[in-house]
Image (cartoon, rainbow, N blue to C red):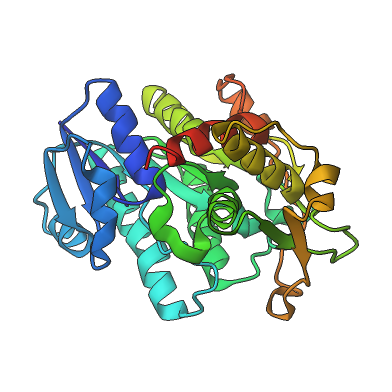
Amino acid sequence: MTIVVTGAAGFIGSNIVKALNARGETDILAVDNLTKGDKFVNLVDCEISDYLDKEDFINLIGSGDFDGEIRAILHQGACSDTMNHDGKYMMENNYQYTLELFEFCQAESVPLLYASSAATYGKGTVFKEDRQYEGPLNVYGYSKFLFDQVLRRRMREGLTAQVAGFRYFNVYGPQEQHKGRMASVAFHNFNQYRETGKVKLFGGYDGYANGTQSRDFVSVEDVVKVNLYFLDNPDQSGIFNLGSGRAQPFNDVAVATVNACRRHEGKPALSLAELVQQGILEYIDFPEALKGKYQSFTQADIGKLREAGYQEPMLTVEQGVDRYVDWLMTR
């Protein structure tokens, strides 16, 4: 039976397909929207059994063509641009589409693993999977939050198959190049350094000093491992934070990225103070457009994930960025 990966040509989806291949899985239906055709490169070295456009797939689901044919759906496909304020599109693409997949999976007793988001927490300071801590700041976060609410209600009523939603925090790693401005800080830091010899970060804001706003940066390697763990453990359902469980400042990402690049250049590592002193790290004024809409601090409470049995250690920024830069250098 087929494993379906939606968003398969995207960042997290393509990494999941590659990891499934590493397990010997090739009966994979890749679902995506290749209107922006350059994403195809993420699937070039993957083995899949078929590809379908996201609209064709959901139509065939609705007409019963896939009844009895699917083993599991790993639903990574979504509009992840937090600056896209087209609410009609966002709700159709992120909420309604997920809802239709959910109804199919419940009717067919098929496991559904889907991408939620840390954007559901908004400006909150506690990042725990509980309604009292949630309050999305944009329609993207709301589209994710609303389906999480559906799952909570349906879990109380009783599920016929596994459903697990993962609230991704700041994911970085290979195969995100197509994301443009929504790509990770590490990706942008790498390109800035390679092009100009410098990295620019936001200056102080919201009570934080230059570059000390902190996020939970999680490697796509860990994100993939968690998805596969739940695929292997279909008795585990619910909404789970998927971050590293630690907050690290943007300064850490910049230092790790520059020093990984310097290693490839045969140069010694530099401290944060040395990078600033030598003008390699610069701070720019915090953008007016982001004031009041910006998470200055995130840190996933991953207690629930650990309770579900996932015990692998999560990569630190220093470990994950170092490996990521090695990959970027091969492109």
| Whether residue 242 can be seen here | no
> To which quarter of the image does residue 268 belong?
top right
Which of these two is toward me, 225 or 62? 225
Drawn side of residue 220 relative to residue 26, left or right: right
Q: Is residue 68 above or below residue 64?
A: above
Q: Is residue 281 above or below residue 308?
A: below
Residue pictured at 45% horizontal, 39% vertical: 329
Please provide percent x and percent y for residue 256.
67, 38
> To which quarter of the image does residue 207 belong?
bottom right
Q: Residue furthest front?
A: 266
Drawn side of residue 128 relative to residue 74, left or right: right
Which of these two is toward me, 117 or 329? 329
Which of these two is toward me, 67 or 284? 284
Residue pictured at 64% horizontal, 65% vertical: 136
Please provide percent x and percent y for residue 81.
49, 66
| Whether residue 165 can be seen here | yes
Drawn side of residue 202 relative to residue 227, left or right: right
Q: Is residue 284 above or below residue 265?
A: below
Q: How many marks?
A: 0
Please provide percent x and percent y for residue 317.
65, 36
Residue pictured at 56% horizontal, 64% vertical: 141
The quarter of the image holding the N terminus is top left
Drawn side of residue 247 relative to residue 35, left or right: right
Please provide percent x and percent y for residue 58.
21, 59
> To which quarter of the image does residue 13 belong?
top left
Residue pictured at 44% horizontal, 33% vertical: 224
The quarter of the image holding the C terminus is top left
